[in-house]
Image (tube, helix red, strand yellow):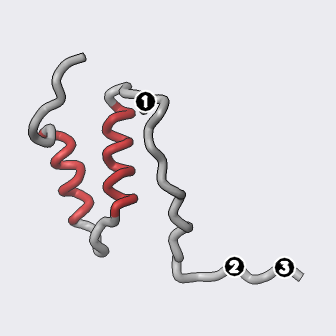
Amino acid sequence: MADWPQTIPHDLKHKLEALEGFGNPPGHQDRWGAIREWLADLGIDAPGRLPDAPEMPGADLGHSTPARR
């Protein structure tokens, strides 16, 4: 296996910086999503024993769906 770079690759750095340009600051899930997408675009699969944290609850979109009667 090749050594991992000691700095963030240029294209990934730009992808992460682009997240900062949106109205709300990016959260950990936003950053992780960008990194996962970048890795997937390179064809890199997640290791089989990747540590996992509990899923975060869904985002509140600021609206509600009327209850069914």
Quarter in which the C terminus is drawn: bottom right
Q: Foreground mark, 2 or 1? A: 1
Task: Identify whether 64 is placed above or below 47.
Answer: below
Q: Residues within 10 Å of mark 3 (few under 14, many from 20)?
A: few
The disc labelled 1 sits on which kind of residue?
Pro
Which is nearer the N-term, disc 3 or disc 1?
1
Query: What is the x, y in percent for residue 9?
Result: 15, 38
Give yes or no for contact between labels 3 and 2 (Cβ–Cβ under 8 Å): no
Q: Give the secondary structure at mark 3.
A: loop
Most extreme residue toward the right, as rendered?
Answer: 69
Q: Looking at the image, tell me whether mark 2 or mark 1 is earlier in sequence order.
A: 1
* Residue 13: % across, % down: 16, 47
Q: Which residue is mark 3?
A: 68
Is 45 in front, or is 16? 45
Amino acid bearing label 2: Thr
Task: Kindly indicate whether the residue at mark 1 contacts the one at mark 2 (C-beta within 8 angstroms).
Answer: no
**Residue occupying image coordinates x 53% and y 57%:** 54
**Residue 47, which numbered label?**
1
Using the rendered view, name the quadrant where residue 25 is placed: bottom left
Residue identifier under label 2? 65
Total marks in image = 3
* Crowd class of label 2 (few under 14; some 14 to 19; many from 20; radius 10 Å): few
Q: Is residue 68 left or right of residue 40?
A: right
